[in-house]
């Protein structure tokens, strides 16, 4: 029994370590949010669920305005602080069922199940105000005003569409187009194509 218990303990430890390894491969170390790989996986799942339930799925892409200037002026540790603070502020505005991911360097993505584009716009505006409403306190004692630009897209996958991967790529690409529209319109804006 003692030998069997030791074997079981090693097996459990291996299973726990494997689960930690898998989780670390899907999590952004800096923000604690999911990473792009996890987002891609969940995008397919959420599109399939939306199609099955006849429900909308919205996507927000956010980019920190003038982030390079933050790093160049205040250093990369300050840039990391800004990213963590933005993630915390966004997390306060979203539901537990929403999928939040760090999409790239200073880009964040949100998948909003059961959310129409006009409701996503309301949330995006709340996020924009939450980020810009109060400066980020840096460890140096300085305060830094930060804003984000946000692009929105939405889809209600029709039944019978088999290529959900392409639909997901289109959803992200449209949010990206709207994000760049927000940036070209002056930054610190939310944009979506209401047509």
Image (cartoon, rainbow, N blue to C red):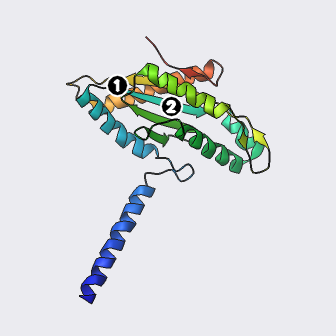
Rendered position, 163 above or below 8: above
Which one is nearer the viewer's eye here, 92 or 147?
92
Q: Residue at x 42, y 37 (%)?
A: 98
**71 with respect to 120 (left or right):** right
Q: What SS does tag 1 mark?
A: loop
**11 with respect to 75 (left or right):** left
Numbered tag placed on residue 138 in the rendering: none
Which one is nearer the viewer's eye here, 166 or 30?
30
- Provide the residue designation for mark 1: 56
Residue 23 lies, in percent from the top left, at 41, 56
Disc nearest the viewer among 1 and 2? 1
Is residue 186 among the parts visible in the rendering?
Answer: yes
Rendered position, 82 above or below 150: below
Q: How many marks?
A: 2
Which one is nearer the viewer's eye here, 168 or 129?
129
Within 10 Å of the Cα at label 2, are there few (<14), some (14-19), or many (20+) other Cα atoms? many
- Provide the residue designation for mark 2: 61
Q: What SS does tag 2 mark?
A: strand
Q: Residue at x 45, y 57 (%)?
A: 24
Residue placed farthest to the left in the image?
Answer: 160
Q: Residue at x 61, y 23 (%)?
A: 183
Residue 135 lies, in percent from the top left, at 72, 37
* Quarter in which the N terminus is drawn: bottom left
* Quarter in which the C terminus is drawn: top left
Q: In 3D space, how far apart are the residues under numbered discs 1 and 2 (Cα atoms)? A: 17 Å
Residue 20 lies, in percent from the top left, at 41, 62
- In which image quadrant can residue 130 be found? top right
- In which image quadrant can residue 127 be found? top right
Residue 5 lies, in percent from the top left, at 28, 83
């Amino acid at each position: 029994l003692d030998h069997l218990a030791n074997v079981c303990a090693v097996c459990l430890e291996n299973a726990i370590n494997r689960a930690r390894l898998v989780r670390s491969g899907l999590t952004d170390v800096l923000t604690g949010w999911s990473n792009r790989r996890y987002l891609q996986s969940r995008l397919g799942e959420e599109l399939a669920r939306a199609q099955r339930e006849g429900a909308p799925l919205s996507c927000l892409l956010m980019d920190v305005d003038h982030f390079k200037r933050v790093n160049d002026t205040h250093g990369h540790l300050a840039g990391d602080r800004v990213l963590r603070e933005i993630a915390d502020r966004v997390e306060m505005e979203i539901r537990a069922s929403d999928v939040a991911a760090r999409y790239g360097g200073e880009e964040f993505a949100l998948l909003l199940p059961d959310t129409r584009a006009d409701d996503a716009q309301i949330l995006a505006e709340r996020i924009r105000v939450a980020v810009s409403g109060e400066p980020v306190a840096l460890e140096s004692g300085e305060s830094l005003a930060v804003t984000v630009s946000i692009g929105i897209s939405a889809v209600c996958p029709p039944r019978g569409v088999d290529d959900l991967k392409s639909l997901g790529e289109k959803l992200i690409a449209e949010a990206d187009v709207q994000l760049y529209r927000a940036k070209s319109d002056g930054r610190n804006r939310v944009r979506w194509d209401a047509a």
